[in-house]
Image (cartoon, rainbow, N blue to C red):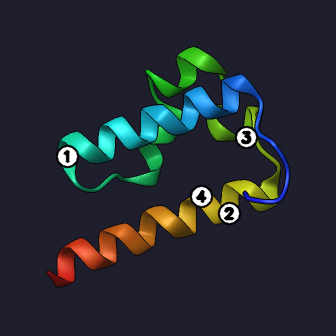
């Protein structure tokens, strides 16, 4: 997702993810398609990010989950 500036609604979406990870440590990707994420855009991340960016985001969440489980 690096390389070009993010819009304010994209930053807000990512902040929701950071807040969830801070509270819970891990996050299932399916939560991105539920409230509070869909409060910003009904399509979840697909409404704010390109398909490549969504794939990157999902990969990051999976990496965090894999690291947390291994620890």
Q: Residues within 10 Å of mark 4 (few under 14, many from 20)?
A: some
Q: Which mark is residue 46?
A: 3
For label 3, the SS is helix
Q: Is residue 3 left or right of residue 69?
A: right
Residue bearing the label numbered 4: 57
Contact? badges 2 and 4 (CB < 8 Å): yes
* Residue farthest along the top direction in this orientation: 39
Could you give the CA–CA distance between mark 2 and mark 4, rounded to whole angstroms? 5 Å
Q: Residues within 10 Å of mark 1 (few under 14, many from 20)?
A: few
Depth order, front residue of 2/48: 2
Q: Earlier in the sequence, mark 2 or mark 1?
A: 1
Contact? badges 3 and 1 (CB < 8 Å): no
- Whole-percent x, y for residue 4 in the image: 85, 50
* Residue farthest along the bottom direction in this orientation: 70
- Whole-percent x, y for residue 21 in the image: 31, 47
- Whole-percent x, y for residue 67 in the image: 28, 78
Vertical order, 17 against 65 (above or below): above
Name which quarter of the figure residue 59 lies in: bottom right
Q: Earlier in the sequence, mark 4 or mark 1?
A: 1
């Amino acid at each position: 997702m690096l390389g070009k500036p993010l819009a304010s609604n994209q930053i807000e979406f990512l902040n929701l993810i950071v807040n969830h990870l801070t509270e819970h440590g891990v996050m299932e990707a399916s939560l991105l398609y539920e409230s509070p994420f869909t409060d910003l855009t009904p399509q979840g991340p697909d409404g704010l990010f390109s398909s490549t960016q969504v794939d990157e985001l999902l990969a990051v969440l999976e990496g965090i989950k894999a690291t947390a489980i291994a620890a």
